[in-house]
Image (tube, rainbow, N blue to C red):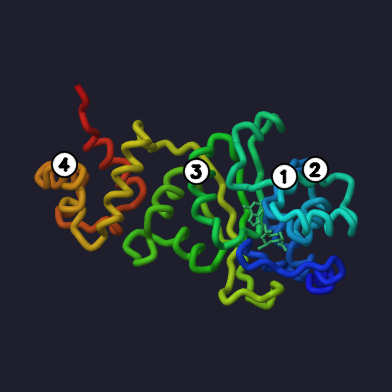
Amino acid sequence: MNPRKILQKYGLSPQKSLGQNFLVDVNLARRLVALSDLPPQATVIELGAGLGALTLALAEASERVIAYEIDKGLIKALKAEGLPDNVCLRQGDILKLDWADLARELDQKLIIFGNLPYYLTSPLLFSLLKARKHLSFCTFMVQKEVADRLLASPGSRKYGLLSVFLGVWAEIRALMNLSPRCFWPPPKVSSTAIKITFRLPDRRPKDEQWFMTLVKVAFSQRRKTLANALKSLGIPRQKTEAALISLGLPVNIRPEALSPTDFVDLSEKLTPIFD
Ligand code: SAM
């Protein structure tokens, strides 16, 4: 596939603001799909169809592909180039998709693929986390740095909010690394393909809102000890320290040293009591 030639043919050029770095090799997309272990006769959603490299690989391996793309110029080009019959192309903004609605429409948990535009990776992951009960798994190509953060272990500098949230509700696996040369135009950074499989964990917070608030506040002040950071939530330092001791954790622990399940346990111990 030669993205530059296809774009030229339709008088288009890659739009940086939409993160348009197109895969140049359909075989790479095929490998990625094979590594994702699609169930037989799957219906898959693709986010950001672009010039269709991943769309074609998905169409070969599944029953049906519903591909979203925001750029009307690309949609015209894709249609003119011709798509397999089992691909349904929809114009729209993936950040505005209602995952629950889509799962109802397909009558199944969603399987989602995407070579994601960098600018929307984080908001998209947060929106998917909220909708996780409607999701089966997602295979995404993301900036390597983002993948490193999602896969980071407690104690590492890269470990943060999303590593904790995904650590509770999903299992993440790196599938392959992709150099900038795999795309046109080549981005400045390398990418990693990851598979995020959502699950219902045994240990999960009873009050999700409270859990998320606690983790967000903890990481917003990661240079402080956890007990000091949580004071801004109105929790006295001594109370957090007592909870940490009861969990067998040091009182002066910093937020990045807690595992996702430590955070779940701590949030249960510190649940506010409302009158
Ligand atoms: N899937 C293609 C590939 O692998 O070659 C294209 C990937 S490119 C990195 C990202 C694609 O997402 C672009 O085609 C871009 O126009 C599209 N896109 C960007 N923002 C979007 C949004 N908010 N909603 C839907 N598509 C979007």
Q: Earlier in the sequence, mark 4 or mark 3?
A: 3
Q: CA distance from mark 2 to mark 4?
A: 51 Å
SS at mark 1? Answer: strand
Q: Earlier in the sequence, mark 1 or mark 3?
A: 1
- Where residue 273 appears, as percent x and y from the top left, is 20, 28
* Displayed-image quarter of ligand 1: bottom right
User: Label 2 neighbourhood size at 10 Å, few (<14), some (14-19), many (20+)?
Assistant: some
Residue 204: quadrant of the picture: top left
Amino acid type shown at disc 3: Leu
Q: Earlier in the sequence, mark 2 or mark 4?
A: 2
Mark 4 and mark 3 residues within 8 Å of each other at the beta carbon: no
Q: Nearer the viewer, residue 16 or 177?
A: 16
Name the residue located 84 percent from the left edge and 59 percent from the top edge. Answer: 77
Q: Nearer the viewer, residue 20 or 228?
A: 20
Q: Which residue is mark 1?
A: 44
Amino acid type shown at disc 4: Ile
Name the residue located 68 percent from the left edge and 78 percent from the top edge. Answer: 181
Q: Which residue is mark 2?
A: 64
Q: Nearer the viewer, mark 1 or mark 4?
A: 4
- Where residue 177 appears, as percent x and y from the top left, is 61, 70
User: Label 3 neighbourhood size at 10 Å, few (<14), some (14-19), many (20+)?
Assistant: some
Q: Is residue 55 left or right of residue 265?
A: right
SS at mark 2? Answer: strand
Q: Seen from this angle, which residue lies furthest front? A: 11
The numbered disc on residue 18 is none
